[in-house]
Image: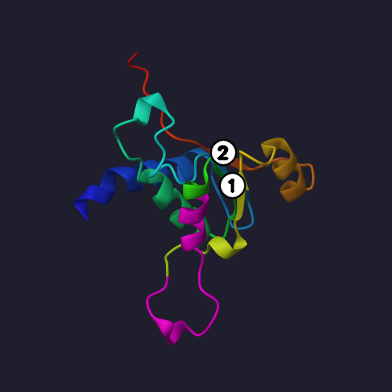
Amino acid sequence: MAAAVGPGLIALNALHFHARLRAGDLALILAGASVLSRRFPSSADIPQPHTHLTLQLASAWGARLLVTVSSAEEFNYLQDLRLPQGPLTQGPQPLIDMLSARIVDLTSEQLADAVAQESGGLGVDCIVGPPVNLDV
């Protein structure tokens, strides 16, 4: 549990204090499967569990999610987080309701088009991305 405190505080700080995210808001989560991502040099050796917690918090608060991925592996990871269809008695339920989320595969879809479509042309209410390491 102690291992989740740091990433949990990052997610809480980003969504609650900075973005003031509320139910119904559209949150754009960049690199939504960044636990798997190795594309960012600043996080090449460090998994980013804060993104998973960001998805959990935003989903629990009733936000609409627009989540980007850049590989089939990341897409499949987020697909596996979707709540199964059927009775709740069929086993443990995932913590993230990804059924209401739109997963944007950046290898085949333009982000601007997805944002315009999901928001009705108004844009997103919140953007959360991976942390950047400024130590170059």
Callout 2, which amino acid?
A: Ile
Q: Earlier in the sequence, mark 2 or mark 1?
A: 1
Q: Nearer the viewer, residue 103 or 24?
A: 103
Tell me, yes or no, if residue 81 can be seen here: no
Left or right: 35 as drawn, with respect to 117: left
Residue at figure coordinates x 68%, y 41% from the top left: 109
Using residue 50 as the reference point, say whether residue 3 is left or right of it: left
Magenta stretch containing residue 91, yes or no?
yes
Marks 2/1: CA–CA distance: 6 Å
Type of residue at label 1? Ala
The image position of residue 126, as x and y in percent, is 58, 41
Residue at 22% across / 48% down in the picture? 3
Q: Quadrant of the C terminus?
A: top left
Instruction: Tell whether label 1 touches label 2 (CB within 8 Å).
Output: yes
Q: Residues within 10 Å of mark 1 (few under 14, many from 20)?
A: many
- Could you say which disc has been placed on residue 135 in the image? none
Q: Quadrant of residue 111?
A: top right
Residue 50's x, y, as percent?
A: 38, 44
**Residue 51, quarter of the rendered image:** top left
Above or below, 43 relative to 136: below
Question: Which of the labelled discs sits on residue 27, or is there none?
Answer: 1
- SS label for mark 1: strand
Q: Is residue 57 above or below residue 33?
A: below
In terms of depth relative to the viewer, which is nearer, 80 or 63?
A: 80
Asked if residue 136 shows in the view, the reply is yes
Judging from the image, the colouring scheme is rainbow
Label number found at residue 127: 2
Q: Which residues are magenta?
A: 75-93
Counting from the top left corner in percent of width and height, residue 104 is at 62, 46
Q: Secondary structure at mark 2?
A: strand
Let me know if residue 124 is in the magenta part.
Answer: no
